Image (cartoon, grey):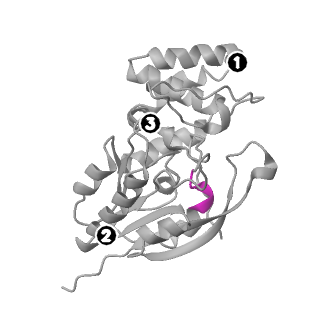
Amino acid sequence: MVQKRSRAFLKWAGGKYNLVEQLQRHLPAADCLVEPFVGAGSVFLNTHYPSYKLNDINADLIELYKIVQQQPERYIADARQLFVPSANERTSYIRFRQQFNEQQDTYQRALLFLYLNRHGYNGLCRYNLSGKFNVPFGSYKKPYFPEAELYFFAEKAQLAEFTCSSYQDVFQQLTAGASVYCDPPYVPLSKTASFTSYARQGFTLDDQAQLAILAEQAQANGHSVLISNHDTTWTRKIYQQAELHTINVSRSISQKGSARGKVAELFALYLAEQKSS
């Protein structure tokens, strides 16, 4: 019997929901799974580790997760009020987006973050250089309110610790028994295909190379690391010390159906040697 996959409550460009089965084949066993780039959390939601350390550089995302973890009933009741027909209009969206960008209260920002995620274009999470959320209105007929997904996340989140740090800090703080799954912003396949504005700091090619070095160092220290990325000549070069696996996946960022297609994806596994007792 095939186990049903659990969906994240956020829409997420580059989310791993459709790759869960393939990832599960390569994710190493561990007492704790560490994710430096947790994103929407599809891997977290569809694996069964005793504990998790879930990190992201996006403070809005992490604050939202902490609130859902700690007070799901209140959050779900309040967020539901933003999923009404009057809020699903371009003028309403622009007003709420402005409120989000001016809002200092973390709880109110968390409510608006979910609203913007579900009403904005294609589930994108994008900020300009000033740190302002700037995704346009999505024009969906009836945005879905993910109540069941929120409750499932809240329950599973009792196993998790959420942090908002750099990926470098996460690697420095690895503890015994931890394995790592990295889903960084992908190396762009073309000069116009980069989505690294997900966070104000961006994610450069130097970051990609440094992440590979950190994975090698973690492996040497007894931690297994799995990284996913586009399968390119360059990624194969920086991951040359890893065990490489490739699969073809569908990409659906483009609004034009003709522009969607199969893209080669690479899994780089740095498997730690089991120390003999």
| Mark 2 vs mark 1, CA separation in Å | 47 Å
Q: Is residue 270 above or below residue 157?
A: below
Q: Which residue is mark 2?
A: 216
Q: Which mark is residue 58?
A: none
Residue 189 figure quarter: bottom right
Q: Which residue is mark 3?
A: 61
Q: Amino acid at mark 2?
A: Glu
Q: Residue at x 42, y 75 (%)?
A: 240
Q: Amino acid at mark 1?
A: Arg
Helix, strand or loop at disc 3? helix
Q: On the rendered image, what quadrant is the N terminus found in?
A: bottom right
Helix, strand or loop at disc 2? helix
Give the percent coordinates (x, y) of residue 183: 47, 56
Residue 32 figure quarter: bottom left
Look at the image and tell me whether residue 50 can be seen: no
Marks 3 and 2: in contact by CB < 8 Å? no
Give the percent coordinates (x, y) of residue 201: 39, 38
In this view, the residue farthest toward the bottom is 276
Asked if residue 18 is among those painted magenta in the image, a careful observer would answer yes
Give the percent coordinates (x, y) of residue 153: 49, 44
Report the front residue among 31 and 127: 127
| Mark 3 vs mark 1, CA separation in Å | 23 Å
Look at the image and tell me whether residue 114 can be seen: yes
Give the percent coordinates (x, y) of residue 163: 32, 42
